[in-house]
Image (spheres, rainbow, N blue to C red):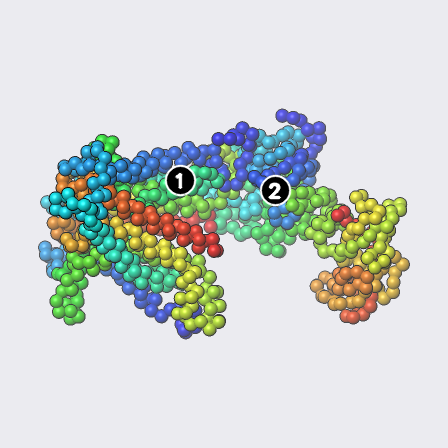
Amino acid sequence: MAGGVASGGSSSAETYKEARNFLLLPAWAVLVIFVLAPVMMMFVYSFLTKEFRGGVIWEFSFAAYDQFFCDRGLFGDEPCSFEWTYIGIFWRSIWQAGLATFFALLIGFPTAYFIATRPPHLRAIWVFLITIPYWVNLLIRTVSMKFLIRDTGPLNEFLLWVGIIESPLGIAYTNTAVQLGLFYSYLPFMVLPIYAAVERYNFALSEAAADLYASKWTTLRLVLLPAVKPGVIAGCILVFVPSLGSFLAPDLLGGARNFMIGSLIDEQFRGSAGNWPFGAAASMILLSMVLLLLMIFARQQSKAEGRG
Amino acid sequence: MPLNKDATAAIDVRNAVKRYGDFTALKTISLSIRDNEFFTLLGPSGCGKTTLLRMIAGFEDVTEGAIFLFGKEIENLPPNKRPINTVFQNYALFPHMTVTDNVAFGVQRLGKSRQEALRRAGEMLELVQLSQFAERKPAQLSGGQQQRVALARALAPSPKVLLLDEPLSALDLKLRQAMRFELKEIQRETGITFIFVTHDQEEALTMSDRIAVMSSGEVQQLGEAREIYEKPRNMFVADFIGETNLLEVFVDKIVEGRAMCHLGGGHALTCDAVEGVGEGAKVHMSIRPERLVLSETEAPENSLRGTVHDNIFVGTDIQSVIDLDDGPRMLVRTSNSDRGKKHLFERGATAYVTMEGGAARLLVD
Amino acid sequence: MKRRNDIKHYTGFLPLTLLCLFILYTPLIVVMVYSFNESTSITTWGGFSLKWYVDVFTGPESAKFKQAAWNSFVIAIAAATTATIIATLAATAIIRGGRFKLRLPSLGLISLPLMVPEIVTAVALLIFYNFIGFSRGMMTILVAHIVFCIPFAYMPIAARMQGIEDTYEQAALDLYATRFEAFTKILLPLMLPGIISGYLLAFIISLDDFIITNFVKGAGVETLPTAIFGSVKQGIRPNIMAISTMLLAVSMLIVTLSYLISKTDKTK
């Protein structure tokens, strides 16, 4: 580093200029070795040959990706025609995650708005109430949901007792149960960024709109929503992304036919039935999708900031 | 370390330049601040005054040139090795320490014992009349009290020079005025050189022994308060300090230290000549509104005719706005206590505006 | 009060907010309530009883759960401590180190574990451990936990540091403190609430993790979540609800603590 000798002083916000590389070293070491390198390794493994008892044989192969996209018939000797099994699982995951996101937005937006318009000293408490469930173990929350909605669980018992329904809803082990689980797991993620955006919103704009004869819902649609859009998008991303790769909700709440990406990947590494290169390839495809989504999002956000 | 010949100067800034990449914050500043002086750097925000202060404190490098403290170059001393202390703009009182611990902090760092530091802190708190708040945390004090703690903390290690970065700007008007006297008092009592940074010209005029008026990274004028107010060197100083009337004049002749000038319409005016303004020059003339007198008849010298546009009551004064026949609009301030002696004119009336002797000042550039 | 003229008020938003809270809390409350159920059948209410809590500590599965709980706490303490130290150092460089080339890449790297889906991190780590021949056990779990705890520890610490003006450290330097003294006597004490907050969040995140742990744990090594998952696969038994309720209480306690600490902001 330059200029250690002649510089007596340092300018503002640079108190730790000389030490910064040293201070960053542990973080870089841990994250490069245990995040970046493993992801690279995973990429490499996705091009290797599978070992039948789990693990890999070090021989280059496209087999994993071939298995993912191509249907080569019963004996694997036909020319490649499009394989729908795995794409179907990915598509179902996107659909499930999308629905969960949509319902989270439906409930999350009014909640975030309501909290952001409370007096300042009450906002912290409301936000705290929303965050607590997030910090509770996801496994426990999913198990709780499973218990709640089973055919003989408290929800159905209650509804039967009240007389709203005559036989149990039968939502356990269905797509609906998985959606409900995803929605429930990540709902706090929808509320928080929207809350932050609405809190920064200048309500004089709404007053100006009202002054110019806009109705409340018109104001919401034409003035408030565009202003808090970055927060809404952030919330959607924060619900959609973890939903997409979720493992617990489909595994515990869904049945055998409600497979999602997470379960597919998990299966490849369980016991001896697995296929590591295929699991690595599926993980790579999931990771690429997520990173692409995040990149589009980052670009959107920086554009929104650029506009002021 | 090179020794400076002029060892009486507390701070000697020589050809100091500060650049941030392509941006030049300070352009070759040279000034010498005397020992025991209350010295003020005055200028609008962004003029470089705070940068200069931070260079003296050691928080900014000097790009070119040098700064001397009692003849010793201090370039290579980090802030914690310079016998210079700062009263920060927002005080920067350590929020997790009591008032006493804040004040004792610097003394202890200098290697003094805890008892010694506490004794010194007690003394300082007495000086700023805050002894009864010694065990409080900064957050439990009012703005004015925090300001005094910051002062006590900076004075406690007995620095050779005290730097004050707009210390009064966060206080309300009444408190600010009271603190001006208190600061001046403390400076006299301690005999420490104060370098005070402000954008408030009134603050500068009331407290300082000498003032350096700065703008765009340059010192525009350096002198005593009265000199700066009455004899501004250029347009910037005349305009920035107090209110003034500006007339565009042509200099015809300079005879025995007097400049003979005329306005665009031909009306003749005379005033003291200044260095830097020669014959044939087209320059601005500055006249303070309180040094103008209104009358019904023309005076023998420097008297201009005009029409009264408006009279505005501003408490201590009445401001008359006069549209000159041969020139721009002029502002005339008549003290309310003078009303008996000086005549007030109705709107639309014709009146003569006369400059008092020595009131008109020619400006360089 | 007339709400019709209140520009900020939208009819129906309050009920939706209450619905949101209802959805978030109902499953948790139901599990808590049923953990006190006397009946052995989990679906019928047989009166209040603490027997399932006693069962957790003395029942047939108690040895397994005690070992798992011990593992979980040891790993959480070690992971949170390491992650907090790494995050504090990194935050000091990123927030107080001025502008430099590595600043944005460092920020990106630290938030990477948040961006990569958990299951992908799990797969990547499993493959990596397998590749370098790191045999799976407590150590593999610990390292994985340190990695994904770093961003959670970093966030409150960095937020706190950003809220502390650097004039405090400058004032310390001005008053003859060395760099080291300015850090230990001024910055660290002011940072303390942020650091504790970060530590507690990292602790909970480690304590709660299931997906990654499940991938990288060796056979026979269990943490509380993996042990619970294993039991649940055979059906939800009341003792699971008792354990869940206890774990839930620990999490809530820690979050509340963290919240209260973060509110003691002396710089304001």
Residue carrying label 1:
C106
Q: Residue at x 51, y 44 (%)?
A: B93
Horizontal and vertical percent position of residue B323: 77, 64
Crowdedness of circle 2 by 10 Å Cα count: few (<14), some, many (20+)? many
- Within the image, what quadrant is residue C46 found in? bottom left
Is B237 left or right of A34, judged from the image as shown? right
Which residue is more in the foreground, C155 or B63? B63
Q: Residue furthest top?
A: B1
- Which mark is on residue B25? 2
Judge left or right: residue B269 versus residue A116: right
Question: What is the spatial separation of the Cα atoms under label 2 and label 1, in whole angstroms?
Answer: 31 Å
Q: Residue at x 48, y 31 (%)?
A: A1
Nearest to the observer: residue A209 or residue B349: A209
For label 1, count other residues whose C-alpha is less than 10 Å away and answer few (under 14), some (14-19) or many (20+): many
Q: Residue furthest front?
A: A79
Report x, y in % for residue A7. Answer: 55, 32
Circles 2 and 1 on the same subunit? no
Secondary-structure class at tag 1: helix
Q: Does the rendering let one see residue C63?
A: no
In the image, what residue type sits under mark 1? Ser
